[in-house]
Amino acid sequence: MQRTLLKQFGNDAETLATQFLEEADFQIVERNYYARKLGEIDIIARKGGVLHFIEVKSSGRKFDPIYNLTPTKIARVIRSAHYYLKTHGLDTAYCIDALLVRRGEVELIENITL
């Protein structure tokens, strides 16, 4: 039961994140892209000729979701992004972003790997 609630909470955060991105003129390319043995990318979107690989993090009232963005998680997203580019034959500008959902508020942090 608890696992189902957490999964629903995460899905709701991703839906809110997708709506936020669309309102900011991002074109959603894919959601929940899974690179076997590498990891998952929550949202892949395009804006202004740049492909954005976006990790969505959310949390309850007392814990800031930025703390869920660990070096290990970022490394997995980077590996998955490289795999996506390779398997799709893409040679394009891209960046790795984080989108934080806090109590219904959304914050996009671009280029988290710089």
Image (cartoon, helix red, strand yellow):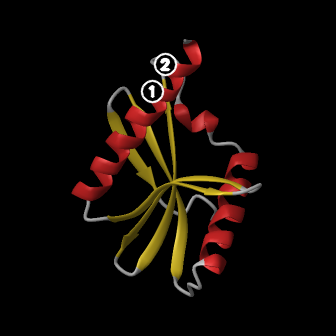
* x and y percentages locating residue 92 in the rendered image: 52, 84
Q: Which residue carries the number 2 mark?
A: 5
The one of 56 and 111 positioned closer to us in this rendering: 56
What separation in Å lies between label 1 and label 2 (alpha carbons)?
5 Å
Residue 8: image tag: 1
CB contact under 8 Å: marks 1 and 2: yes
102 on left or right of 24: right
Which residue shows up at 67% across the image and 72% down it? 82
Q: Residues within 10 Å of mark 1 (few under 14, many from 20)?
A: few
Which quarter shows the C terminus?
bottom right
Indicate the amino acid at tag 2.
Leu
Measured as percent of width and height from the top left, residue 97 is found at: 52, 58
Q: Residue at x 39, y 45 (%)?
A: 107
Residue pictured at 39% horizontal, 71% vertical: 46
Q: Nearer the viewer, residue 11 or 51?
A: 11
Crowdedness of circle 2 by 10 Å Cα count: few (<14), some, many (20+)?
Answer: few
Residue located at (58% from left, 58% from top): 112
Question: Could you say where residue 94 lies in the image, as x and y percent from the top left?
Answer: 53, 75
User: Which quarter of the image is occupied by the N terminus?
Assistant: top right
**Judging from the image, what secondary structure is the residue with disc 2 in?**
helix
* Up-down relation of residue 79 to residue 41 (above or below): below
Q: Is residue 37 left or right of residue 54?
A: right
Give the residue type that dot 1 points to: Gln
| x and y, in percent, of residue 53 in the image | 52, 62
Residue 12, above or below 22? above
Helix, strand, or loop for circle 1? helix
- The residue furthest top is 1
Residue 22 has which mark?
none
Residue nearer the viewer, 84 or 55: 84
Extreme left residue here?
A: 23
